[in-house]
Image (cartoon, grey):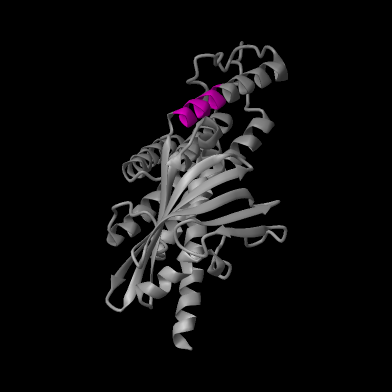
């Protein structure tokens, strides 16, 4: 009497790697959902995605629910499909507002690659998958070749995604300072006053600053150089008292580039609403850096720190 051959078990290395890649997006979704449950508001000046605060609890519930379904083997495939749908909506939302949209795509790739490695049912859907009851051939080298081919495809997809990213970029953050526009304007219009609130040079003890040109306003030049912060120049192109300061940013190291920075000041009762923004264009290398390092998010966080520091400096002077 013949017995039916047993299905080939998933190699342990694939299971371990699959679960590692599974936990990364699952924990990210659970953390994001937990933040929404707690009602934590985005920092002032963060991009407005257009969702009402009342919707955050429901969005958090969806994120955690999808992550839990994805973690359990019996419902993992359903969870991956639901997560993909949710992430597709997230990508569309960020594209609509002109914000960085690569993180949801990266999470989606991890979701399916992790499931591919740990779940034989998903691998069975691939066109190169041999029948699970067939006699194993090729051993480790064949499995390694398939994983390598998958990685090459993923790299090609990521490369195409980088090429498809928008060439233009923009970052903007805002805050309100309890002081008249003239006092806030003075902190930006004179490069000599940047040191207490400028966030970019913090943490780089080698950074050196040279201020040239006009004492303040149009024509003032600020040069920096340091091991961590690289090298570059800022030049004030336009200065409209208590309204606008426009600066030309020229980066020399670690990568060359040009951008425009604006500070906009608006009176708000007896306070000042100040907006710090940057816009420019990226070539392919610049887009790759932005994709891999989350440059736009990092710039936004620096702007938030700088505006917070400026608020502290200006309001402390008012209290004296």
Q: Nearer the viewer, residue 199 or 91?
A: 199
Task: Identify whether 26 is placed above or below 205.
Answer: above
Q: Residue at x 56, y 39 (%)?
A: 289
**Which quadrant, please, contains the N terminus?**
top right
Q: Residue at x 57, y 18 (%)?
A: 132
Residue 89 shows in this picture: yes
Task: Identify whether 206 is placed above or below 319.
Answer: above
Image location (x, y in percent) of residue 136: 66, 14
Quadrant in the rendering for residue 100: top left
Q: Residue at x 58, y 58 (%)?
A: 212
Image location (x, y in percent) of residue 159: 52, 27
Question: Magenta stretch containing residue 155, yes or no?
Answer: yes
Q: Is residue 247 left or right of residue 116?
A: left
Q: Nearer the viewer, residue 5 or 147?
A: 147
Residue 307 shows in this picture: no
Q: Which residues are magenta?
A: 153-163
Image location (x, y in percent) of residue 123: 53, 24
Q: Nearer the viewer, residue 285 or 111?
A: 285
């Amino acid at each position: 009497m013949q017995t039916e051959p047993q299905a080939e078990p998933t190699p342990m290395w694939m299971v371990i790697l699959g679960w590692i890649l599974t936990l990364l997006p699952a924990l990210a979704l659970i953390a994001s959902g937990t933040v929404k449950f707690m009602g934590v508001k985005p920092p002032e000046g963060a991009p407005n995605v257009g969702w009402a605060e009342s919707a955050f609890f429901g969005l958090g519930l969806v994120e955690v629910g999808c992550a839990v379904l994805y973690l359990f083997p019996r419902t993992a495939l359903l969870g991956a499909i639901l997560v993909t749908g949710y992430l597709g909506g997230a990508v569309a939302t960020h594209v609509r507002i002109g914000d960085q949209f690569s993180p949801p795509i990266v999470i989606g790739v991890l979701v399916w690659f992790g499931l591919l490695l740990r779940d034989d049912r998903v691998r069975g859907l691939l066109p190169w998958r041999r029948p699970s009851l067939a006699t194993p051939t090729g051993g480790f080298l064949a499995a390694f070749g398939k994983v390598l081919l998958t990685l090459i495809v993923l790299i090609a997809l990521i490369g195409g995604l980088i090429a498809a990213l928008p060439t233009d970029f923009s970052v903007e953050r805002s805050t309100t300072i309890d002081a008249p526009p003239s006092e806030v304007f003075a902190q930006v219009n004179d490069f000599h006053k940047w040191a207490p609130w400028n966030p970019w040079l913090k943490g780089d003890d080698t950074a050196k600053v040279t201020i040239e040109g006009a004492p303040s306003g149009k024509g003032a030049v600020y040069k920096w150089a340091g091991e961590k912060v690289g090298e570059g120049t800022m030049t004030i192109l336009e200065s409209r008292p208590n309204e606008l300061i426009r600066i030309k940013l020229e980066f020399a190291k670690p990568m060359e580039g040009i951008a425009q920075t604006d500070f906009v000041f608006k009176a708000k009762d007896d306070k000042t609403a100040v907006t710090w923004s940057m816009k420019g264009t990226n070539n392919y290398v610049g887009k790759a850096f932005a994709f891999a390092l989350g440059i736009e998010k990092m710039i936004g966080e620096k702007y938030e720190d700088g505006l917070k520091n400026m608020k502290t400096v200006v309001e402390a002077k008012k209290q004296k």
